[in-house]
Amino acid sequence: MKGKLKEKASQDIPDLAGTVRSIVSVQRSDGEIPWSPEGKTDPWDHVESAMALSVAGCFEEAAAAFAWSARTQNADGSFYASYKNGHPDERRKDPNMSSYLAVGVLHHFLVTGDQAFLSRMWPCVESAVDFAVSMQAPDGEIFWSMDDNGVVEERALLTGSCSMFLSIRCALVLASRLSLVRPQWEFAVRKLGQAIRGRSNLFDLTKSRYSMDWYYPMLSGAVTGEAAGKRFSEHWDKFVVPHWGVRCVSDRPWVTMAESSECILALTAAGRYEEAEKIFSWIRDSRDDQGGYWTGLTFPDSVIWPTERTTWTTGAVLLAADALFGWTEGRKVFSHAFWEQVRLHQKAGTRMETFAKMPDRVVPSPDAARDDRQRQTG
């Protein structure tokens, strides 16, 4: 980070330079960002870490990470679920991990305005999203994975499908910026959104104990407005632990920095900044003396568990801070207000050539404000 941005951001995160360095120091010379120096590389988490580097102004390092994705992508547009030492580790082709590249590319473009980068990465984004859409079921959900023999595991995860909802939307904005149309993607994202909002039976309900299944419909922008306020309120006490953060799963005394950060992204997306700021205040110091953020803490005994500091956890914290404090234009990717602008452009049939400045704060809906008051008054 440089200049005014560095000065402002340093007030929001203690030892910001160390936090950024904890990601950069793990990145390999070919651009790959594994979880840890000796850890595996998850293609989704790799992109999230690259997005954090974009936020931090490490544009060369972020571009190198995206270049690694382009070189690693399979011929059918997919990525394997994980890599180790530059080679496929878990040879399962995952449409969510594959298509998230579109979110990272749009995010980097919003931060940098680098048209050449967008054009360079477009073939990879197009191929990845085509792969994800090819895995869509007739009712709209997207199946979980495909093996090397082309056999599809016909099980759909709500969190993954929400993530792909956002990925396809981002890809459509990129296509519009390049004067391209992809009606098959538009049809796919409409069906997917309908499934997420109204067909919970299509998804693996055993995952509902995970907080991601609670907040990802709002983080992705699939659920907005009054429905978002209702969903936040219904499960708030199930997952949010005052003064600690957000649980990973509802039945374990364990809060994680990544889930807390993603919940912050979901809250800021809906304009619920007061709640987001509160959660951020609980986790902002949960890092080691080098600046990297711990994966999680048990409560009430405050034991760090596990004793690891992954790049993607720190990346999630940086993305949450950006959304909350307004460091860069990249935060628009997670904003319901931005996606409403996109919808209006699409309805009018105009290209998304420019991206209007967003206000620093989006005023919460009356429903959200009412839910806040009800929760505070018990």
Image: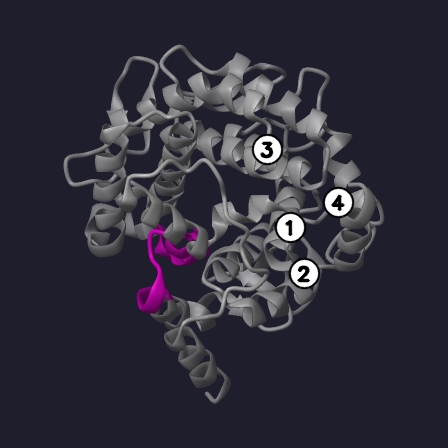
Q: Kindly check if marks 2 and 1 are in contact, taking CB atoms under 8 A apart as contact.
A: yes
Q: Residues within 10 Å of mark 2 (few under 14, many from 20)?
A: many
Residue that sits furthest to the left in the current view: 138
Chain part drawn in magenta: 207-228
The dot on residue 292 is 4
Q: Name the amino acid, label 4.
A: Gly
The type of residue carrying mark 3 is Gly
Decide if residue 117 is in sight here. yes
Disc 4 is placed on an element classified as loop
- Whichever of callouts 4 and 1 sits on the residue coming sooner in the sequence is 4
Q: Earlier in the sequence, mark 2 or mark 4?
A: 2
Q: Split into 4 quadrants, where in the image is the N terminus?
A: top right
Nearer-N-terminus badge (2/1): 2
Compared across the picture, whether 54 is left or right of 201 comes to right
Give the left or right position of residue 48, taking residue 378 as reference: right
Q: CA distance from mark 4 to mark 3?
A: 28 Å
Q: Is residue 362 above or below residue 90?
A: below
The answer for how far apart the CA atoms under marks 2 and 4 are is: 12 Å
Q: Is residue 327 left or right of residue 275?
A: right
Residue 250: quadrant of the picture: bottom left
**Secondary structure at numbered mark 3:** loop
Residue 113, numbered circle: 3
- Tag 1: residue type? Val
For mark 2, what is the residue?
283
The answer to whether mark 3 and mark 1 are in CB contact below 8 A is no
Residue named by callout 1: 317
Instruction: Tell me which residue sits at (64%, 42%) in the image.
Output: 315
Q: Secondary structure at mark 1?
A: helix
| Pointer 3 or 2: first along the chain | 3
Task: Quadrant for residue 136, please give it.
Answer: top left
